Image: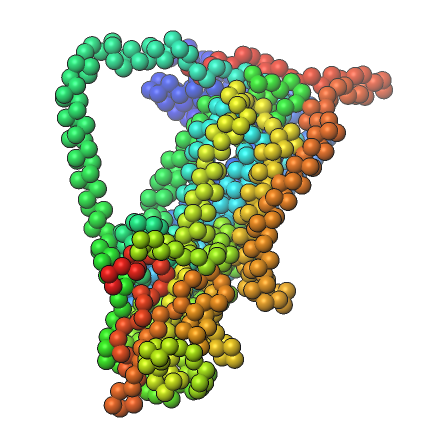
Amino acid sequence: MTDSDQGSERVDVDRQSEHGPTERRMTGGQRRAERRAGAALAVAIVAGVGLFVVYFAGGQTQVEGVLFAIAFGGLGVALGIWANHLLDAREVVEERHELTSGPAGREAFENALTEEVGPVLGRRSLLLKLLAGAGGALGLALLLPVLSLGPAPGDTLKVTPWRRGSRVVDEEGDPVSLNQVPEDGFLTVFPEGHEGTADAQALLIHVRQGSLKLPPERMAGVPEGTHVAYSKICTHAGCPVGLYRAESQSLICPCHQSQFDVSDGAKPFFGPAARPLPQLPLGVGEDGVLVAQGDFSAPVGPAFWDMNRGR
Amino acid sequence: MSMVERSLKYLDERLGTASLARKTLRKVFPDHWSFLLGEIALFALVVLIFTGTFLTFFYTPSVQEVVYNGPYAPLQGTEVSAAYNSVLRLSFEVRAGLLMRQTHHWAALVFVASIVVHLCRIFFTGAFRRPREVNWLVGVGLLFLALGEGFTGYSLPDDLLSGIGLRIFYSVTLAIPVVGTWVTYLLFGGEFPAPDIISRLFVFHIMLIPALLLALVGVHLAILVLQKHTQFPGHGRTERNVVGKRLWPEQTFKSVSLLLFCTAVLALLGGLAQINPVWQYGPFVAYNVTSPAQPDWYIGFLDGALRLGPPWDLTLFGFTISEVFWPAVLFPGIAFGILTLWPWIERRFTRDRAEHHLLDRPRDTPVRTGIGTAGLTVFFIMFLEGGNDIFGVLLNVPVETVTRILQWSLLIAPIVTFLITYWICKGLSRTRLRPAQINAGVRLSRTPDGGYETVSLEPVEAEEELEPAER
């Protein structure tokens, strides 16, 4: 141990003796660089102290950001100057070594894996097959808990809480009656008891008399010929269709600008949506409150694989 | 014996670290500004981990309804989710919380941006060629993970804007043929907005994706060290050597300096440049929507693709293929598939199976450069379309016009870009200018006694032969 102790001491002595002349040999440029780096570090120190002051004074996001930037930036400037002016920045050449182990090396590896260890694997093919089978069975079984992550889709995407006789309410749960929404106005409505439910959201639009061009069976779900309701979920990518242009009677999805013609069954006429917004058939209850005559005319929202099967 | 020497001795006698550490310190890295792009990504990741850990201590991954009663007056008394509530608290009540949150968000934007620019550097200089195909795959994997990490993090505040983003993502997974509904329900835990989604996103964002990300970063760097860095052709540089600065001290000082600069810029942005003010968007409500609605920049191309997409859905044997499938499933699948397999695709045409450690200049490979710029054009047009409503307002033209122009551009512009790039590359190549290879020759230097002498600028040889890394 004493040997290495002495050795390290010698290095220390060497380093000290090296140190003196290096400082004396410093050029004017290096002295200037050292001053600049020193100044940058001093600025960083000031900014660091400033951060303490700001934090304990209650904190202020903008000042904190600036002081952090000055502190980190000061250190960065100092190290940058150091790297560029105070280090002996010589270009060095390093030879690349061969990456490959070569055919002999690969063969040796294969031997180490199989032949050198004797007949561990080769003659037990039945056992190997069973091992693969057991591994496969267990592997699949281990995947089973993944199925617990979600319910089976079933019909959930094809139905909404709207039922025959569901009373039409607004987001607060207040019933909506005929003519409550002014002409050219619209309102987001839900089935009573399901206020705010994502797939039930519908737009009740009070259109001008005679402006709807719907087939008779669809008109049957439009009280007074003026109160039409469509799903509010865009059939393209599911955003709420939140914009209504009354003069052209068109609905616009703010996400991807699909546009739907309210007077013509909410068929899309511009943008990426391919299917009309499903209609919600409405009627009027005894007390003048709007009620649904059933669920939407089609599955609401974006398309999915089996949307047109077995609804 | 000093403290340092004692601990070095302790470690070396037990782990043999000294010679390994010495070899590492002596490692040579070529010096070029474009080699720092990947480092910027790494440093943004460092900032992300530190700021993100801080955020984790305050964030509540839950959609349980609570009434907001913090200092932000416009939302007082509003029912919001616990997640949204915790983000508001972090922004308005936790000291330095907003700085950390905004710096985290900015760092995420810079992280993905520097990965993309780094990827462009690798692509256009041919740095993916043999023997670096494996590291290309690792790098592309890192890009995907970074996108996933960005999107999951963006969705965590449970504000109205990110909720709409999540809704669109849900619609995209629904559009996957055959298994779409199952994949979506397993991922989201049921029909949108299933209550588990926020806590699941949290697990993805702070555990699963970061673990994979860090593991792959480790592999990425290990392969880099093993294979040694590529270099541009130039004086004294060959396929058999690496000319550059040593890891210690030059490269270390430079890299640490860059790390500090990146952090400084991110802190400055986080302090001064407001980003994602979720209190202005309001809490997520399934039947509300904001307009205009743009995602973070790196998802912009996908949102734009959805806006550009043709309204073509398809019913085959009673089964439906959504119009969302083409722009948001098929297009990214093909585009990222080509990106992933590029080293092998290119090899099919060039038949070049040789090892390459010297980089191409983009002008010398006009076809590859042209394909690269054409690909970037496709993504850029989609990115622009992601802001079609904003451009409509700014330019005072109908949004329909903006979309039509960009739809046609998507068909024409990539071809035009390819041809122009090819032409420029050929022109540059004909000049036979090789700035990097101009022989530095000799330099005149003034001697102390007033005379002049010539100093040769031959590259300095390494003063000693480095031992190979293995025994």
| Depicted B278 relative to depicted A210: above or below | above
Residue at the (46%, 47%) spot, across then down: B331
Residue in front for this viewpoint, B323 or B8? B323
**Residue closest to the far bottom:** A287
User: Which quadrant of the rendered structure holds the N terminus of chain B?
Assistant: top left
Residue B12 appears left or right of B30:
left
Query: How was the colour assigned to the protein in this rendering?
Result: rainbow
Residue B196 appears left or right of B379:
left
Residue A34 position in % (x across, y down): 65, 35
Residue at the (52%, 38%) spot, across then down: B119
Residue at the (44%, 62%) spot, across then down: A273
Residue A244 position in % (x across, y down): 47, 75
- Within the image, what quadrant is residue A187 found in? bottom left
Q: How many marks?
A: 0
- Within the image, what quadrant is residue B17 found in? top left
Residue B386 position in % (x across, y down): 52, 57
Answer yes or no: is residue B453 visible: yes
User: Which quadrant of the rendered structure holds the C terminus of chain B?
Assistant: top left
| Depicted A218 relative to depicted B184: above or below | below
Residue at the (20%, 38%) spot, across then down: A140
Residue in front for this viewpoint, B229 or A23? B229
| Depicted B444 relative to depicted B46: above or below | above
Answer yes or no: is residue B95 visible: no
Residue B98 position in % (x across, y down): 46, 58
**Residue closest to the far right:** B450
